[in-house]
Amino acid sequence: MKTYSKIPSGERLQSILCPLCGSGEDKHKLLYTYDLYSFKKCSGCSLVFQNPQPLFPDLSQRYDEDYFKYEIENEDSFFSLMMMALSDIGFESLDFSPFKKLRILDIGCATGRFLFEFRNRDWETAGIEICSGAVEYGNKKRGVNIHNCTLEEAHFPEKSFSVVHASHLIEHLNDPASFLGEIYRILDDRGFLIIVTPNIDSLQGFLFRSGWRSAIADHLFLYSLKTLEKICIKYGFHLIRKKTWGGLAKGLAPPAVKKILDIVAKKTGTGDVMVMLFQKTAEMQ
C-alpha cells in the first residue's frame, strides 16, 4: 500500500464502529484492500475508513525521524498550501471581535512553520505534534510552543483558543469523535475550526479509486464534503464555508488540461483537497 511513512511490521489491529452513525462491521462494505489494510464504506452514512485499524501506540511509531525529514523537506510547500486554504475561506475577513485575545492552536503542526507566521502577527500560539523530532525543531529553532502529545493529552483549559487549525490531520486519527469533542471544549464561544483534508468525492478519487494518492495506509479516514460536515455538526459545529482544489495532480495531464480541470474542480467542489471552516455552536448535538 502506498505511504510516505514507514509501516512497522506486526502492527496490532482493532475493529471499530462507525464514528459518525455508530454502525457495526455488518454495514461496512469493502472498497479497497492492501494486505492487512482495508478501506470500507459505511452503508449507514457513507463515511469511508480503514477497518480494522492499527492501535494508536503502534500507529504513533510511524511518525519517527524519517517522517520528520519528510516534513522538513516539504515545509515551504505545505505552508504555502495552508495559507492558500486560509485565503479560500476568507480568514482575514472573519469577525474576531468577540475574543479578548487572539489565540490559535495548530494540531499536527509538524515543524511549527504555521505557528511561527501567526506568532509574528501577534497571535498567542500553541501546537500539538506527536513527532518528537519536529517538536524539538519547532521549539528550539523557531521558538514556538509545541506540545509533544495528542490533543487529548495536552489538557488545555476550557475555551482556551479562538481558532483551531488542523491541516491534513483528521484523516490520520483513530478517534475523530474524541478529537472533535475536545476541540469543542477548548474553543471559545463562537470560535472557529479550520480543517483541511483529502476529498474522497474528488475527480481524482473517482478516476483512480484504489490508486488515488490519498488512499494510503497512513490515512485511517477518507472524508467527503458531506461526511466531514455531518461529523462536525454532530460534535457541536456549524459550517460557514467550504472550498476544494486540485483537478489532477501535476504530471498526470498536459499543463493546459490540468489548468482547465483545476478550475472546474474548484468551481464544482470536486477538488482533491478540501478546506472547511466551522464555528462552535451553542451546544453539542
Image (spheres, grey):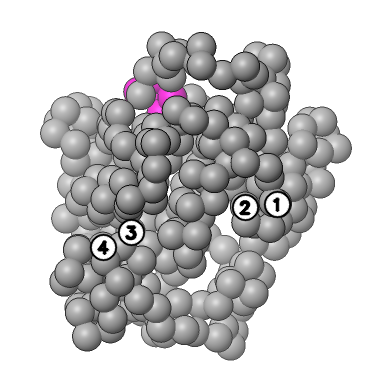
Q: Earlier in the sequence, mark 1 or mark 4?
A: 4
Check residue 151 in the rendering and tell me which mark sits there, or answer none: 2
The residue beneath circle 1 is: 154
Q: Reading the chain from its start, which is encountered first: label 4 or label 3?
A: 4
Q: Residues within 10 Å of mark 3 (few under 14, many from 20)?
A: many
Distance from Cα at disc 1 to Cα at disc 4: 28 Å
Residue on which disc 3 sits: 222
Q: Secondary structure at mark 3?
A: strand
Report the magenta residues as a range: 84-88
* Residue located 65% across and 14% down the image: 121
In the picture, measured across the screen, residue 155 lies left or right of residue 106, that is right
Residue type at mark 4: give it: Leu
Q: Secondary structure at mark 1?
A: helix
| Quarter occupied by residue 216 | bottom left
Residue 27 or 31: which is nearer the viewer? 27
Could you give the CA–CA distance between mark 2 and mark 1, rounded to whole angstroms?
Answer: 5 Å
Residue 87 falls inside the magenta stretch: yes
Viewer-closest of 212 and 23 = 23
Comparing labels 1 and 3, the label whose residue is closer to the camera: 1
Residue 15 shown left or right of residue 187 in the figure? left
x, y percent for residue 11: 57, 83
State the separation of the CA atoms marked 4 and 2: 23 Å
Quarter occupied by the N terminus: bottom left
Q: Amino acid at mark 1?
A: Ala
Q: Splitting the image into 4 quarters, where does residue 150 fall?
A: bottom right
Tell me residue 259's x, y (percent): 22, 28
Report if the CB atoms under discs 2 and 1 are less than 8 Å apart.
yes
Q: Nearer the viewer, residue 183 or 256?
A: 183
Q: Assign a secondary structure to mark 2.
A: helix
What numbered label is drawn on residue 47? 4
